[in-house]
Image: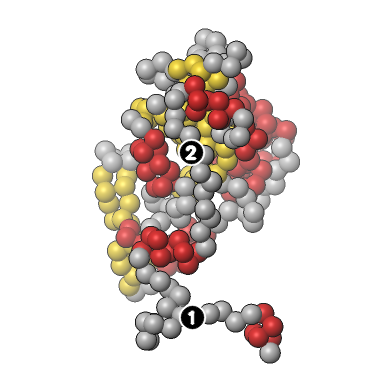
Amino acid sequence: MWAISMWYLPDQLNPVAYQNQRVVYDLLFKAAAETLSELAANPKYLGAQIGFTSILHTWGQNLMHHPHLHCIVPGGGLNTSGKWVHARKRFFIPVKVLSRKFRGKFLYYLKQAKLDYYGSIADLKDQERFNELMSSLYQKEWIVYCKPPFKNAGCVVEYLGRYTHRVAISNNRILKLEDGAVIFKWRDYKDSNKQKEMKVTTEEFIRRFLIHVLPTGFTRIRHYGLLSPRNKTTKLKLCKKLTKTKISDTPKVKLSTMELFKKLTGKDINLCPCCGVGHISRASPEEEIA
């Protein structure tokens, strides 16, 4: 059994997050991870160490800045005795408990962070104004949403495929480009999930798209607990054994880009496009220089 949880920052923090992307996004990962791990370790909810994968998204359907995490969590964990503990049918942590602990952790770390403020939020450099913002955020109910558990691992893989390596907008949502404007489809979740069309100037479209370019080298998919890299060969194997999950002893063969492309499409991109027989070979660095 697997479940999904989504962790959202209040809109008031969007400009702060955009001007301090690396810092704020790291805090988003940190606060959500600690919240899940600590509450799961509490015997009141599960009493075990869990594993989970967190994926950062920074966009909403209208391409505006909307940073949030998707967390994929197995329905159970490993207790201190080395035994597998199953989560309850409705999963293990109430949403309100998650959201309030998450809020407290995030704001605690945010107050200690070194942040920059420019333009419309330059007044936050003033400590009194910053304290007012913190006070309003403490009083606000933060949104942490949990989806029902997945039926099987196949559903988990399907979900991962939709959310891991996506960009802010896919080509099929872009309907038209004309007269200096872009028209694209979007889903308005605030209006009964209705599908609508939005028209913006090309400059505004490019601006919105570029908002979601992450800082160089930033890791937007992270694994924690039992799924973390250091536990893959130890605790994760034990969990598979305890849950009677099939373990493959055959090492995976790493395919080259061309081999993977051929496996997925059936096309050999190494073949000459003209004769269909000869192979295209890349020149060596020495030949290229010559």
Residue type at numbered disc 1: Ile
Helix, strand or loop for disc 1: loop
Residue 259 picture location, percent across and down: 46, 64
Residue 229 picture location, percent across and down: 62, 38
Residue 38 picture location, percent across and down: 60, 20
- The crowding category of the residue bearing disc 1, from other C-alpha atoms within 10 Å (few below 14, some 14 to 19, many at least 20), is few
- The crowding category of the residue bearing disc 2, from other C-alpha atoms within 10 Å (few below 14, some 14 to 19, many at least 20), is few
Which image quarter is the C terminus in?
bottom right
User: Is residue 137 shown to the viewer in this render?
Assistant: no
Q: In percent of the image, x 40 and y 42: which residue is there?
A: 157
**Gap between marks 2 and 1 measured at Cα:** 36 Å
Residue 55 as seen in the image, left or right of residue 131: left
Q: Which residue was labeled with disc 2?
A: 248
Q: In percent of the image, x 39 and y 82: which residue is there?
A: 277
Residue type at numbered disc 2: Ser
Is residue 128 positioned above or below 251 on the image?
above
Q: Which residue was labeled with disc 1?
A: 280
User: Is residue 22 shown to the viewer in this render?
Assistant: yes
Residue 75 picture location, percent across and down: 44, 24
Residue situated in front as seen by the camera: 272 or 168: 272
Q: Residue extending furthest top?
A: 44
